Amino acid sequence: MNDSIVTEVTSSAAASDGRLIRVIGVWGLAAGIVNVTIGGGIFRLPSGAAATLGAAAPLAYLVCAASMGLIVLCLASAGSRVSMTGGPYAYVETAFGPFVGFMSGMLLWVGITLALSAVASFFADAVAAVVPALPLWGKRVALVVMLVALAAANVRGVAAVARFNTVATVAKLVPLLVLVVAGAFAMHSDNLRWTITPTGGTVARASILLLFAFLGVESALVPSGEVINPSRTVPRAIFSAMAAITVIYLAIQVVAQGLLGAALANDPTPLASAAAVALGPAGGTLILVGSLISMFGYVSGMMLAVPRMLFAFGRDGFLPSALARTHPAWHTPHVAIAVQVGLVALLATFGIFEKLAVAANVTVLLVYAACCLAAFELRRRNVQTGGVPMRVPFASVVPWAALGVIAWMLSSVRQNEWIAAVVIVLFASVVYALTLSSRRARAATT
């Protein structure tokens, strides 16, 4: 892709993004990353880690955090150079053009839409568990009411939603921090002793599992067109959030292991059980409520980020232009928000997403790979759409090291997961081909 095409792509997108308001600061974006990364999975994650590594499970967290750190460096580098709404989709498009950008964007959108639908469905199930008398239709109504309420809040303005996500992030972390503090005084040191020395292979398998607990950075970066001074805000927010997430995960794993010992590996609700040991029956209830808050906060954060991808697709002519409309009073992509909510409600209510959910992980990893290449290309071309780009240490090596990590993780992908990913790519290729003439015509008139 030559420099003139890069300029054309970025100028057109930047003009469209000019209708959005930049109101998200470092702490708002960092809170959003923590919010969408620490979701419902952490409430059952320690069990799977212990089943593979036992008391040595923290090793996998450290390996996983280091691997993700390489990918995050690439995301931060690209994000500091490309300030347009769309996140990784915008980074890759700016580096390699609309075809590769749209492929990455579609893979990312599918992956995080499936994740959002799954968590929304889990939230409804959790509500039903708290209120056993709630009929099936009541659970579905609760789900739709939640999604509509969050959509309405997003339409009214991103600033209020960013503040709410900051509050929700704090609220969801309180039960986890209570467990960590109380558990630290109640756990048994014998439960933390390694009975075996794990092999590199077992650490690798556990790390692959745990890596997905760190995913979420990419979705929080989608509304980059509404971030204040992205070249400084994006990298600071990413590293602040990743440091906090790693410390929280390690503390939770150690405390759960110290409280439950060998029983942790076979416990379907490990944190509730650990809280019951440390705090009594009320502790289990606290964690259950905390899981509801966590999932609600996750859905809220995703409802801020995911519709902006539809906005970007509409902005660039891949999907109907109506998706790129902004509300005349609140300057938010209200059409994209409404479409996204309708789709998520449909998937979460009827569970259709389960047939494609296996593709979510591989699609996001493929997007990460594209972002690593984009970070290298953007730096090579010295592309920047706002502010002074971030200086990444060992910038010429980091993208390739990150790609090596991604290739290592993708080596565990099963055949049916690859098939699902190929289907998504073929669908995106058809959409790209069908819209090619209209996009060329639009470009000729601008």
Image (tube, rainbow, N blue to C red):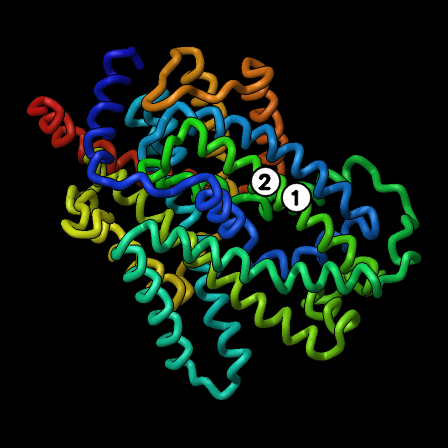
Q: Are marks 1 and 2 in contact (CB under 8 Å)?
A: yes
Numbered disc 2: secondary structure: helix
Viewer-closest of 404 and 191: 191
The outermost residue toward the left is: 445
Relative image position of residue 117 (x, y in whole percent): 42, 59
Viewer-closest of 323 and 150: 150
Query: Circle 1 is placed at which residue position?
Result: 246
Q: Could you tell whether 208 is left or right of 182 in the image?
A: left
The answer to which image quadrant residue 120 occupies is bottom left
Distance CA(mark 1)–CA(mark 2): 6 Å
Quadrant occupied by the C terminus: top left
Relative image position of residue 286 (x, y in whole percent): 63, 72
Viewer-closest of 49 and 19: 19
Q: Could you tell whether 240 is left or right of 419 in the image?
A: right
Numbered disc 1: secondary structure: helix
Give the vertical position of 197 relative to 351 (above or below). above
Q: Could you tell whether 263 is left or right of 337 in the image?
A: right
- Residue 416 visible? The answer is no
Task: Tell me which amino acid carries mark 1.
Answer: Thr
Viewer-closest of 94 and 26: 26
- Per the rendering, the mark at residue 230 is none
Query: Circle 2 is placed at which residue position?
Result: 242
Relative image position of residue 161 (x, y in whole percent): 37, 55
- Residue 427 visible? The answer is yes
Give the vertical position of 242 relative to 303 (above or below). above
Seen at 52% across and 85% down, the residue is 132
Image mark count: 2
Seen at 20% across and 27% down, the residue is 12
